[in-house]
Amino acid sequence: MTPPRAVDVARWLWIASALLSAVRTYFVLADRQGLRDQVTAIEPNLPLQQVEAVVNGEIILAVLVSAAIVGLYVLVANKMLAGRAWARVLLTFFGVIFVLLGGLGMLGVADGLAASQGLTVDPTEVALSALGLVVDVAALVAMWLPPSNAYFRTAAAQFVLPPPRQNQFPR
């Protein structure tokens, strides 16, 4: 049974969403001076060597977490493509949360709330976030289109129970 085009598109959109998230992380990590400033704002008495060590640790941890997230998205998206309903539900759960949080973040940027709180707003980061929001919405829609629903119903019927074996319990 081959999945409909909508499910395949949804898989690639979820993978693209994870990659966009990794790119956004890269842009945050590229501002090394900004990371130093954050560390010194939290702990102003740290020597420069320790500030650099903390920044290096943040960068390494962020890269590892980002790689793990991309890997998990690829794994779950491939399971969704294989017809696993749990993967579709998991992607839906996280997708809805990310769309809601992303929408709230965009509202905060649009109405000036972020700037009034003293947060700097990088236009590249905002553009990537907006693009990620659009990709997440498109992936959610593609995953729940009527052909996708029919595919998951058919796939679920195959995963329920294997057919019984003949003469499994001889008398």
Image: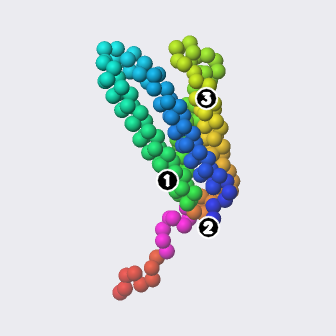
Of callouts 3 and 2, the N-terminal one: 2
Please name the residue shown 42% across and 84% down the image.
167
Task: Examine the structure image and report whether residue 88 is included in the region drawn in magenta.
Answer: no
Can the viewer see residue 81 in this picture? yes
Which residue, given by chain and number where applicable, does mark 1 sit on?
Answer: 75
Query: Which numbered circle lies on residue 170?
Result: none
Query: What residue sits 49% from the left and 26% below the top?
Result: 31
What is the secondary structure assignment of the residue under circle 1?
Answer: helix
Q: Are marks 3 and 2 in contact (CB under 8 Å)?
A: no
The answer for how far apart the CA atoms under marks 1 and 2 are is 20 Å
Q: Identify the residue shown where x is 41% and y is 33%.
A: 59
> What range is drawn magenta here?
156-163
Disc number placed over residue 1 in the picture, else none: 2
| Foreground disc of the pair 1, 2 | 1
**Amino acid type, mark 3:** Thr
Between 31 and 133, the one nearer to me in the picture: 31
Residue at the extreme bottom = 171
Label 2: few (<14), some (14–19) or many (≥20) C-alpha neighbours in 10 Å: few
Q: How is colour applied across the structure in the image?
A: rainbow
Q: Is residue 103 left or right of residue 161?
A: right
